[in-house]
Amino acid sequence: MGFKCGIVGLPNVGKSTIFNALTRGSALAANYPFATIDPNVGIVAVPDKRLDVLTEIVPTQKVVPTSIEIVDIAGIVKGASQGEGLGNQFLSHIAEVDAIIEVVRCFEGTDIIHVNGSIDPLRDIEVIKTELILKDLEVLAKYKTRFEKLAKSGDKKALQVMPLLERYEKIFNEGKTGRQAALSEEERPLLKEVHFLTEKPILYAANVAEEELGKPETAHTTSVRKKAESEDAAMIVISGKVEEDISKLEAGEREEFLKAMNLSESGLERLAREGHKLLALITFFTVGETENRAWTVEKGASAPRAAGKIHSDFEKGFIRAEVIAYDDFVKYRGEQGAKEKGRFRLEGKEYIVQDGDVMHFRFSV
């Protein structure tokens, strides 16, 4: 599994349409609020051209790309944190994801009614942010009550935690997000059990009309991009309609369709790329006669940590890793060619995995 993300947005912004297109799922998409009654979940295989190239070099029985788990959460409206609409019961689902994809409507049109009556991406972003902050204040109040009691009894950890919770409370009351709390490496473990929604990384998906995709940015998409940059968030431009069309095509047809649209990649590929950057994730590969597979690991992970992604025994009994950089593997047409050119390496426990590494692990149990 690559990462788990929750897809959120106001009603009628194209959220469920995009979810269906990305996952080839069947979430109810309709022109009225709250078409999503339960949080739909889809596992999406992430296209990676490098895996295709590796398979040309090393034919195999099975090819397994990395994947993203996407949770489609009901449209959130103003007042959701206090139970308005259906948003409140779904805010809890956001707590379980690694990142938030926020679909922002950037297309005009009267056939799909905006819940607020007009198109204003920045206003919509502010509504979602406010509801998440209000929910975080509710969570904070519960933890504060608990730690206050412990602090009064002289509990050492509680005495350290209380100033941090007060810092968050001040930030939330100023309309800022948990991402702006700037905890130090020493402080962060103290709040390991406290999960604030606004601490999660955000990727804004600006949903545009079909004819606007691949064209210069509109005023709406530009405003979303600037907003993302100001928050150190990620942003992609996507068209729910185009992704819906792509999802109905076979692999070869998709390539032709993208070329006709003057696009080099699909929205899913852009989402995966930006999501990996946002969460500081990289991909390494294992290849062989039975399976060629892509694996996701945190940037900066050691070789044993990467081995543990395959099986916990690989990490516990790690001996060494056989490593070939992707470019070398391709250039010299596989392991044997890389060995002949001196590009095959044996790495130990201290080795930091690089994006694209082709690896084989030696271990004992």
Image (spheres, helix red, strand yellow):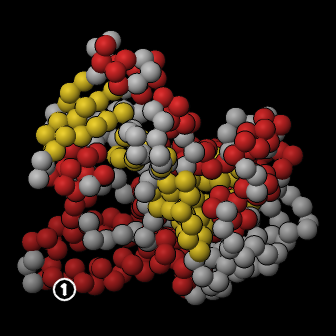
Q: Position of residue 362 (x, y in %)?
A: 19, 40
Whether residue 126 is visible to the viewer of this picture, yes or no, is: no
Q: Which of 227 and 304 lies nearest the eye of the viewer?
A: 304
Residue in front for this viewpoint, 182 or 260 = 260
Mark 1 element type: helix
User: Residue at point 19% right, 55% down?
Assistant: 313
Identified at 63% across, 50% down, the residue is: 268
In which quadrant is the N terminus drawn?
bottom left
Instruction: Count up the numbered dots.
Output: 1
Q: For this rendering, which residue is in front, 137 or 128?
A: 128
Q: Is residue 220 left or right of residue 112?
A: left
Q: Is residue 226 above or below residue 111?
A: above
Amino acid at circle 1: Lys
Position of residue 87 measured from the top left corner of the image (x, y, whole percent):
60, 80
When the figure is inspected, residue 342 is found, relative to residue 326, above or below; the finding is: above
Q: Quadrant of residue 311?
A: bottom left
At x 22%, y 61%, the residue is 189
Whether residue 321 is visible to the viewer of this picture, yes or no, is yes
Determine whether, in the image, residue 23 is placed left or right of residue 63.
right
Q: Identify residue for label 1.
A: 149
Q: Could you say where residue 201 lies in the image, as x and y percent from the top left?
A: 47, 55
